[in-house]
Amino acid sequence: MASLDDLKKRISSVKSTQKITKAMKMVAAAKLRRAQESAEKGRPYSDKMNNIILNLSSGISDIQNAPKLLSGTGEDKIHLCVVMTSDRGLCGGFNTNIIKKAKLYFQKILDEGKTLKIITVGTKGYDQLKRVYGDNIIERISFKDSKNVNYFDADKVGKIVIEKFEKKEFDVCVIFYNQFKNVITQIPQEQQIIPLKTIDEETNSSDDNYEFEPEEDEILSNLLPKNISTQIFKAMLENSASEQGSRMSAMDNATRNAGEMVDKLTIEYNRSRQAAITKELIEIISGAESL
Amino acid sequence: MSEEYSLEIVNPEMSFLLKDDVTEVVVPAYEGEIGILKDHISIISFLKPGIIKVFSKSGEESFYVNDGIIEFKNNSLSILTSLILNLKDIDKEKISEIQKSAEEELGNPEINDQEKYLLDQKIEVLKSIN
C-alpha cells in the first residue's frame, strides 16, 4: 500500500489536472458557441451554391461536353482523399473517428487495386496516417496560424485540388470531415466532390428557363471550381464546430473522472491514516502492558 | 402594384444583407452592367470586380464586390460573393491592400488573358473608390 505521503501527493496532482480540464472545457464551450454560429451562418452560401449548380446541370443537354469537374474524367483509377482533421489534440475521439472512416475507404480503394493519394489538412491527421500511409500522402496542409476558419484558407485547399485535377493527377476526389450534429454527436462524413454527385436530379428538374450570361457551359466551368472551395469551406466550418464540441464533452468527462478519482483517493488516504493511528495505539497499549 | 422585390447577399461567412423592399439593383455582370427590376426574366450570371448599387425605399447603397454569382428567380435576387465591402464604411487601407495584391498578381507572367482582364478591372474599380 502506498504511504500516506504518496497518497497526499497523488490527490493534489489529480486535483490540479482537474483544474486544467475544467478550464479547457470552459474555453471549448466559449469557442464552440462561436464556431457553431459561423457554421450556421455559412450554410446559406453553400446551399445557394448547390442550388444554382443543380439548376444549371439539370439544364445541360449535352452531357458529353460537360465540364470534367462535373462529369469526371471517365475513369476511376486514382482516388484523391482530402482528410480534414484538427491541429490540436485532447478532443476525444474527434480525429480518430475521421481517420477510422478514412482508413476504411483507403483499404477499399487499395483492395480494388486502385491508386491512392492523400492530402491531409490539419497536423493531427498527418500524425496518425504517416506510419501506414506515409507514401501515399502527397501534400499536407495546416492552418495552425489562422485563428478562425476563413474562406481564403479553404480556397487555398480548393485551388490545390483543382490544380492537381487539371494536371490529371487523379480521377475521383473525396473529402473526409466530421459533421456537427450536437455537442455529443459528430458524424464522420465522406463526401465526393469530383466528379460532382448531383443528387436526385430528376426531382429537381425545374421548369424555369434561365437566361444565361455568359454561356451556360462557361458559367458552369467557372462555378464548379468555386463550388469545390465552398464545399471544403463548409467542411472546415463543420469540423471546427465538431472539434470544439468534442473537446468540450471530452474535457467534461475528464473533469468528472478526476473528481471520482479524488474521492476514491481521499477515502483510501483516510483509511490508511486511521489504520496508522490504530496501529500506533495498539503498540502503545501492548508496550504498557508488558511493563 | 408594388415595384419591390427581395434581395439576399451572402458570403461564405454569413448572410451579408437581406432586404425585401428593393426597387432596382445594378450589378457589374461579366459582360457589362445589368440593372434588375421587378419581374425580370430568370437569370444566372457572373460578376466581375465592381460596384453593386442597391436602390430601395430606404435609400441607395453601394458595395464593392470581388467576384460573384447572381441568380434571379421568382422576384428574388441572390448574390453570392466571396468578398463584399460596404462603400459607406470602407477602410482605405484594406482597399489599398487588395489593390496591391492584385497588382502583384498582374505582374505574374503565368496568368492568362482572362485573368489579366479581371485584374485590370479590379484595379481600375479600386482606384476609382480610393
Image: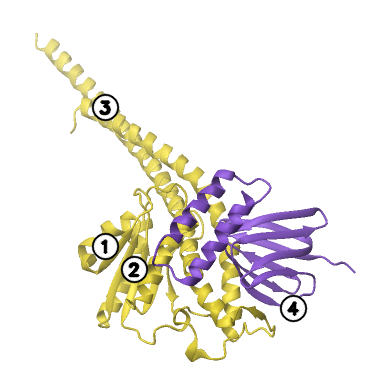
User: Of all residues shown, which one is farthest toward the left?
Assistant: A291
- Name the residue rendered at 32%, 36% in the picture: A264
What is the chain letter for disc 2? A
Which residue is tagged 2? A102
Which residue is tagged 1? A129
Rendering quarter of residue A107: bottom left
C-alpha gap between disc 2 and disc 4: 45 Å
Residue A200 shows in this picture: no
Position of residue B31 relative to residue A43, above or below, is below
First in sequence, mark 3 or 2: give its number. Answer: 3
The answer to whether mark 3 and mark 1 are in CB contact below 8 A is no
First in sequence, mark 2 or 1: give its number. Answer: 2
Q: Considering the numbered disc 2 on the image, is that residue within a helix, a strand or a loop?
A: helix
The answer to whether mark 2 and mark 1 are in CB contact below 8 A is yes
What is the chain letter for disc 1? A
Q: At which x and y percent is residue A256?
A: 40, 42
Q: At which x and y percent is residue A72?
A: 42, 83
Q: Check residue A222 in the rendering and tell me which mark sits there, or answer none.
A: none
Name which residue type carries label 2. Ala
Which residue is tagged 4? B41
First in sequence, mark 3 or 1: give its number. Answer: 3
The answer to whether mark 1 and mark 4 are in CB contact below 8 A is no
Position of residue A212 relative to residue B35, above or below, is below
Name which residue type carries label 1. Leu
Which residue is tagged 3? A8
Position of residue A276 relative to residue B109, above or below, is above
C-alpha gap between disc 3 and disc 4: 79 Å
Q: Considering the numbered disc 1 on the image, is that residue within a helix, a strand or a loop?
A: helix
Q: Nearer the viewer, residue B117 or A101?
A: B117
The quadrant of the image that shows the C terminus of chain A is top left
Rendering quarter of residue B41: bottom right
